[in-house]
Amino acid sequence: MSEKSRRRRKALASGTGVAVAIFAALAATGLSLTGPLKPAMPDKPAEAEAPKKTDWRNLARLALDEEKLSFAEVTFESGVLTISGDTQEADDRTRAFEVVKQAVLKDPSHVGVVLALENAITLAGQALADAPDAASTMGAAPDAKACQTAYDTLLEGRVINFGSGSAVLAEESKPLLDALAAVAKRCETYRVELGGHTDARGDATANQALSERRAQSVADYLVSKSVPASLLGVSGYGETQPKDARGNAEADAKNRRIEFKIVEDVAQ
C-alpha cells in the first residue's frame, strides 16, 4: 500500500471516531443533529373516579322485588323516598316499608340525600295517617343543619292542626307530631323554638294569645313523648308573620302553623 493510501485510510478512521464521539455526546445531552430531542412525556396521573351516585328508587325497587312485594311502587322526590301501592294485608304494608328502610340505611351515602322515608301504601284502598320517617335517615351524629332539614322536610306541605279557635291538638296531627318528636330526640344537643302563627281573621290580640297557647300545646305533646322540656322554647307570633298574604282560605290554612327552628347548641 502506498504512503498516500495509508494517510487517506488513517484520516477516514480518525473522522469516523470523531463522528461516533459527537453522536455519543449528543445522545448524552438529549440533543440531535436535527434539533433538540423532545423530553419524554410523564405518565398522566390516573383520573379519580367520580363518586358513585346511588339510584335510590332502583335500590328500593330491587329490595322489594327480592322479597316478592310487587304491589309496592317507589318514588323519590325532594329527598323523600315514598313507597306507595295497595295491599289487603297490614303485615305486608309494614314489611314493604321496612324492607326499603333497611336497604336504604345499609348504604351510608344516603345521609344528607335521602331525607325521609314515607309509607303511603293504602290498606284495602284506605289511606292511613302515617307521617314520613325523617329521624332514621339522619346518620349517627346529626348536626344543626341536618336537624333543621329534618324538621323542614316533615313540615313541608303539612301543618299541625288544632280545633277551631282553640289550642286542642287535632287527632289526625299526632302521627306528624310523633315524627317530629323522633327528630327532636335525635337532635338532643340542639334547642328548638316552637313558633306559633295564626291567620289574620279576628282580633290581633286574641290571635297573639292563641298562637302562644298552640305552641305550648305542641311542646307539651313532645314532652309527653320523652323530648326533654329543656330543649323546647315556645314563642307566639300571632298574625304578624304570614307565609301567604292573599287573604283567602288557602292562604289562611298556610298561615296557621307551628314552625320548628334550631336556635341553640346546648352542648357548647
Image (cartoon, rainbow, N blue to C red):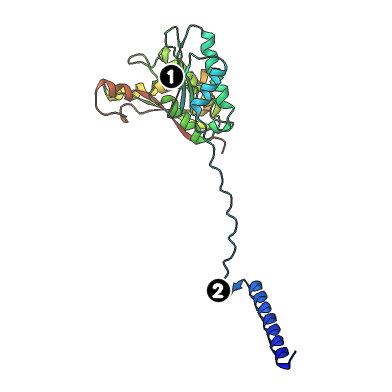
Mark 1–mark 2 Cα distance, whole angstroms, equals: 91 Å
Query: Residue 127: image x %, image y %?
Result: 42, 11
Q: Locate residue 124 relative to residue 3 in the image: left or right.
A: left
Q: Which residue is mark 1?
A: 217
Which label's residue is closer to the chain start, 1 or 2? 2
Callout in the foreground (1, 2)? 2
Say which of 60 and 102 sits in front. Answer: 60
Residue that appears at 58% across and 60% down: 41
Q: Identify the residue at the far left of this view.
A: 247
Q: How crowded is the residue under tag 1: few (<14 C-alpha within 10 Å), some, or many (20+)? A: some
Query: Residue 47: image x %, image y %?
Result: 56, 48
Residues under numbered marks 1 and 2 in contact, where contact means CB atoms less than 8 Å apart: no
The quadrant holding residue 100 is top right
Q: Identify the residue at the far front of this view.
A: 1
Q: Is residue 167 shown above or below 208?
A: above
Kind of residue at disc 1: Ser
Say which of 166 and 29 sits in front. Answer: 29
